[in-house]
């Protein structure tokens, strides 16, 4: 029972369109509150042609309710589920940055190669977010059994500060939140989904870890080895293509990294990492085992330079910007005078 209630309405002013997908549109907006309070957020709105489809609306609302309680630095935060003129919308954390698809296109355009350590770092942050989501329980401490099912370049964001964020749980499955047709339909991006997902089988968290392996291989090689000319060919490659020795595809990939990739991309789920935490551990040992490794700041500097963003300027070398240390004797002396 609530101690008390506060009734209040938010106002959102749409500023610009950020992204337009098949089922929804994401905008940047200003959330207005009392006393000229303004917060920049992202607003996800259902396309009108889906707004009357009962199951789609239920899943859109289910996504908002599910992600609202996923509070983690590597997952885009959901703030509010609202409705206007009969259309549902979700207010979310605004990420000033790009998704991995935009990031790698920029790398190609600038003829730059992503350093191996940053590829592993990005993937380790995704594994961190998934480890948290996979282990999430409800208020009664019952596991939710969350499986994202759409871990891919478009759903991984990098902020210009270097934060890595997993987003779009729109086709995730979790107990009690979303209508699930698994086994009847295939949902997700064909060139990132696991073999069991591509084959209409029931998935668990190990399916997401296969997708993370695809992401890591794509970041390292600059291409997705499973991508075919169409969705059917991609699914066929996912299910049947032998996993290569990655050392022969890129000289930067050593034995340990090759083993991590094969551990992620095993066709048999029982031969994969069992949890996101295990994968995260191996990735972080790989980049930090010898000492200092990449950080959010390292990635932030790289992406700002890549996209021509100015780094924060140092404060002017003037007296009013300097830190002043006042000695105890000086304070006592001033009191006596």
Image: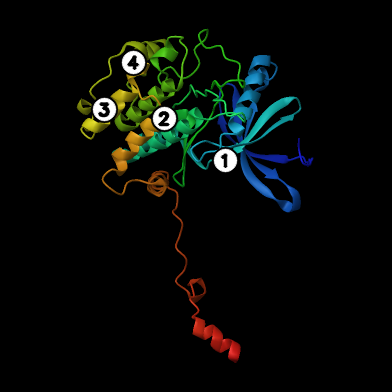
Q: How far apart are marks 3 and 4 (CA)?
A: 14 Å
- Of labels 4 and 2, earlier in sequence is 4
The quarter of the rendered structure image containing the N terminus is top right
Label 2: how many residues lie within 10 Å, few (<14), some (14-19) or many (20+)?
many
Instruction: Estimate the x, y position of residue 210 in percent, counting from the top left.
Output: 38, 22
Which numbered disc covers residue 259? 3
Seen in the image, is 315 located left or right of residue 252?
Answer: right
Task: Please tell me whether mark 3 or mark 1 is closer to you in this view.
Answer: 3
Please rate how many residues cluster around mark 3, counting C-alpha atoms within 10 Å: few if below 14, some from 14 to 19, many from 20. some
Marks 3 and 1, Cα distance to the nearest angstrom?
Answer: 36 Å
Q: Which mark is residue 267?
A: 4
Q: Position of residue 94 (x, y in %)?
A: 57, 40
Of the numbered discs 3 and 4, the one sitting upstream in the chain is 3
- Looking at marks 1 and 4 on the same chain, the residue that comes earlier in the sequence is marked by 1
Q: Label 1 belongs to which residue? A: 94
Relative vertical location of residue 252 with respect to residue 230 in this rendering, above or below:
below
| Cα–Cα gap, marks 4 and 2 | 17 Å
Q: In which quarter of the image is residue 247?
A: top left
Query: What kind of element bears circle 1?
Result: loop
**Which tag is nearer the camera, tag 1 or tag 2?**
2
Whether the residues at callouts 1 and 4 have beta carbons within 8 Å, the answer is no
Under circle 2, the secondary element is helix
Asked if marks 4 and 2 touch (Cβ < 8 Å), the reply is no
Contact (CB < 8 A) between labels 3 and 2? no
Whichever of callouts 3 and 2 sits on the residue coming sooner in the sequence is 3
Q: In this view, does 124 lie above or below 214?
A: below
Whether residue 106 can be seen here = no
């Amino acid at each position: 029972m609530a101690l008390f209630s506060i009734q209040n309405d938010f106002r959102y002013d749409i500023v610009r369109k950020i992204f337009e997908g098949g089922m929804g549109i994401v905008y940047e907006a200003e959330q207005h509150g009392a006393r000229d309070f303004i917060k920049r957020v992202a607003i996800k709105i259902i396309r009108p042609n889906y707004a009357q489809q009962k199951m789609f609306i239920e899943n859109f609302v289910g996504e908002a309710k599910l992600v609202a309680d996923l509070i983690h630095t590597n997952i885009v935060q959901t703030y509010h589920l609202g409705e206007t003129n009969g259309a549902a919308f979700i207010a979310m954390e605004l990420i000033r940055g790009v998704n991995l698809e935009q990031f790698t296109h920029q790398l190609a355009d600038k003829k730059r190669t992503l350093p191996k350590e940053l590829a592993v770092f990005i993937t380790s942050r995704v594994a961190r977010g998934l480890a948290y989501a996979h282990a999430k329980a409800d208020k009664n401490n019952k596991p939710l059994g969350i499986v994202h099912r759409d871990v891919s370049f478009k759903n991984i964001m990098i902020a210009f500060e270097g934060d890595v964020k997993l987003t779009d749980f729109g086709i995730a499955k979790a107990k009690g939140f979303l209508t699930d047709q698994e086994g009847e339909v295939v949902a997700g991006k064909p060139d990132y989904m696991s073999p069991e997902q591509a084959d209409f089988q029931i998935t668990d968290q190990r399916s997401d870890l296969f997708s993370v392996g695809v992401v890591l291989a794509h970041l390292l090689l600059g291409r997705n080895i499973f991508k075919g000319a169409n969705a059917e060919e991609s699914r066929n490659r996912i299910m049947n293509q032998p996993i290569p020795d990655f050392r022969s595809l890129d000289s930067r990939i050593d034995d340990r990294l090759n083993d991590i990739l094969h551990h992620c991309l095993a066709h048999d789920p029982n031969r994969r990492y069992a949890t996101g935490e295990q994968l995260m551990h191996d990735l972080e040992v790989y980049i930090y085992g010898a000492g200092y490794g990449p950080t959010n700041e390292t990635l932030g500097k790289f992406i700002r330079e890549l996209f021509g963003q100015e780094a924060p300027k140092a404060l002017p070398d003037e007296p009013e910007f300097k830190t002043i240390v006042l000695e105890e004797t000086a304070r006592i002396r001033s009191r006596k005078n």
